[in-house]
Amino acid sequence: MKKRLLSALVCAAMAASLLMGCGGGGSGTDGSESADGGKAAEIYMFISSPEYADAINELIAEYKTVAPNVTINYETTQNDYPTLLKAKLNSGDVPDIFASTSGKEIEVYKEYSYDLSGEDLMDTMLPAVADTMKDGNGEGVYGVAIKGNYFGMVYNKALFEQAGIEKAPETMDELADAVTKLEAAGITPFTGGFSEWWVFKHTFQHYASAAVDDYQEFAAAMEKGEDSLANYPEMSDNFFDLIDLVAEKGDAKPLEADLSAEIAAFASGQAAMVLGQGAWIEADVLAIDPNIEIGFAGYPVSDDAADAKVITGSDQALRVNKDSENLDAVLDFLNWWYTSDYGKAWFTDVAGVVPPITADVESEFEIIRQGNALVEEKGSATLGIIYSTDSFHTAFGEAMQSYVAGTSTKEETIKTIGEKWVEIDGSSAE
């Protein structure tokens, strides 16, 4: 298993918040024949999730040995990705491969997307993953996943033991007790990563799942302005109580702590619990401290321990531009990724993620191993983030950042979230 530091650069070029893969942007092919008879092609891949930059670059490098005449220009960013993607689509500069949230956003970007349901990769894609890639009618498959995922609270077992905490807290009272014990032992309880808008969506979905029986129905009602967070104590009280607690008992400057700062604080033993993260951080944590004892659990979202469940599923989709000039080359690459021996092993051995494919492989990552056991024991909470767009989630995160900054009250923040849900996702459903 390869332990990787989170890259600051994808290759050599960096521009503002964008990380650019070797070769730059744009796509095209001169159609010239190579020595082995294959056509030269250039694929432009613009996706989010820069935490996988190293792993994807390894994937691209390996594919170069298979298809030496295919160049993959890889560009990644997290900040403001939905806005940047829409700007590219509106200008006609549609990437050959681009990313979106699965679920609701499959329909939003369907007009640009190729239906992959007839491709070889469908032989290995998990049916549950394929279901999140279908359109609003449950038809077609308009994306592939870099990963399945696990979302929950990541904690340091050794620091918990040092503070006299015997198990991960499952209720709000148990969480408060754990925080008290950690502080008494001189240990900072949390690192929150509040400068990242997506930390809030990852955390919020646990509270919403505990509050409602049908998350998709709840999201649809919010889009129409027919419901409010204020109607559910788990969302209007417990979620905000957690954010308050993390802001008070966590990073010295909570709104300046990003993903890299979270990973560094946790891996170096400066904080006992990590907010808004999951399986994707483990490789980078282990690169800093290979001996850290990682624990994984559901959030204590209520007074009922049964509600403390982890979440699993596939929340991100990679889409293929149906009008790509290099469609055959793109499909060849994705089919190789999902069906070749290297491609199938890449998910666990290089990226360290929950495989989105059928694979008879046991992960070496603790978060995945413990996540599997927790789902077996308690079941999984709903992967609710796929029922709203990333454009909404970005606005949601910004509203929560204002709350943390103290420029918006809880009531004002709840009102803003409700308005943004209607304004952004309500309009997209029309």
Image: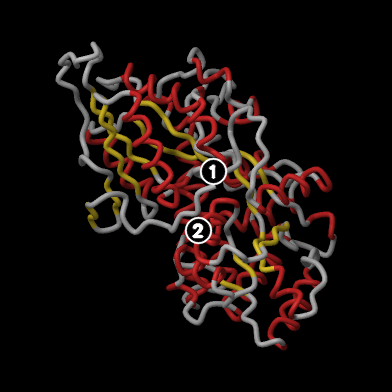
The residue carrying pointer 2 sits among few (fewer than 14), some (14 to 19) or many (20 or more) residues within 10 Å by Cα, namely many
- Return the x and y of residue 254 as percentages of the image width and height: 49, 75
- Return the x and y of residue 349 as percentages of the image width and height: 54, 41
Which residue is located at x 61 percent, y 41 percent? 354
For residue 332, above or below residue 88 = above
Q: Is residue 345 left or right of residue 205?
A: left
**Number of numbered tags placed on the structure image:** 2
Question: Foreground residue, 345 or 334?
Answer: 345
For residue 90, above or below residue 291 = above
Q: Is residue 157 left or right of residue 326?
A: right
- Return the x and y of residue 192 as percentages of the image width and height: 55, 69
Q: Kindly report the distance in space between the C-alpha atoms of the residues bearing marks 1 and 2.
A: 29 Å
Q: Which residue is mark 2?
A: 284
Q: Quadrant of residue 292?
A: bottom right
Q: Is residue 404 left or right of residue 304?
A: left
Which residue is located at x 75 percent, y 82 percent? 181
Q: Is residue 358 left or right of residue 370?
A: left
Amino acid bearing label 1: Ser
Q: Earlier in the sequence, mark 1 or mark 2?
A: 2
Q: Which mark is residue 388?
A: 1
Amino acid bearing label 2: Asp
